[in-house]
Image: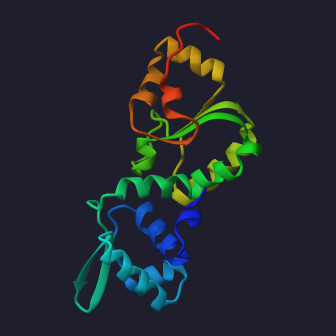
Amino acid sequence: MFLEDIVISRVRVKLLNLFLQNPGQIYHVRDIVRRSDEEINAVRRELAHMEAAGMLSKEQRANRLYYAFRKDYPLYHDLRCIVIKTSNLGAAILKNKNKIGKIRYAMFSGRYINNQPYDAEKVDLLIVGQVVLPELGVLVRQEEQLRGHEINYTVMTEEEFSFRKRRRDPFITDILSGGRLMIIGDEEDMLKVSEKPL
């Protein structure tokens, strides 16, 4: 269920998380070592493997080497989605889904995925189902502290969600018309509009 389950190297998992949670950032080798809390030789070995695989680009500045994740790497967007879904708030929702309640759908908006600035008018996280709000609130507040800004989230029951979809409610239409990353539930099922009331 998590990146560690499909990527054998613990160091590579840490490097993928670092680069893909911070798209466009470049890192000096010693900075990567400090952020990953791993031995320098293990980090250098993984950087070399990832560069050889075409994941990373390398740039020399003065006498320092800097690395960045290549956005033209064929699996860039797929890996980024996996990292977002299985780290920080995504991981917390997946690990605590039984405590949070009975969730039918949970999705991050494209805005959230792309680290766009907070906008009170836009939703970062949508959860549909029977939700224990205090449990979810704790997880959201932890992520807000990490990100340094508020996360705008919306919770609704399946009945309300279906009703508002059928009515083409502008709020729901806006959420569903943008990019998204499903954390829980089937995207096609979520987007389907049932013709008859529940």
Counting from the top left corner in percent of width and height, residue 183 is at 56, 44
Answer left or right for 32 relative to 150: left
Counting from the top left corner in percent of width and height, residue 165 is at 51, 17
Answer left or right for 95 relative to 154: right
Judge whether 122 appears above or below 194 on screen: below
| Residue 145 seen in render | no
Count of numbered labels shown in the rendering: 0
Answer left or right for 42 relative to 179: right
Q: Residue at x 37, y 75 (%)?
A: 50
The foreground one among 61 and 77 is: 77
Q: Residue at x 47, y 23 (%)?
A: 171
Judge whether 141 appears above or below 30 on screen: above
What quarter of the picture does the N terminus occupy? bottom right
Q: How is the image coloured?
A: rainbow
Counting from the top left corner in percent of width and height, residue 33 is at 47, 83
Counting from the top left corner in percent of width and height, residue 10 is at 55, 75
Answer left or right for 81 relative to 136: left
Judge whether 137 appears above or below 147 on screen: above
Q: Residue at x 32, y 72 (%)?
A: 53
Judge whether 151 appears above or below 192 on screen: below
Q: Residue at x 51, y 72 (%)?
A: 14
The foreground one among 10 and 151 is: 10
| Residue 9 seen in render | yes
Task: State which quadrant residue 44 falls in.
Answer: bottom left
What quarter of the picture does the C terminus occupy? top right
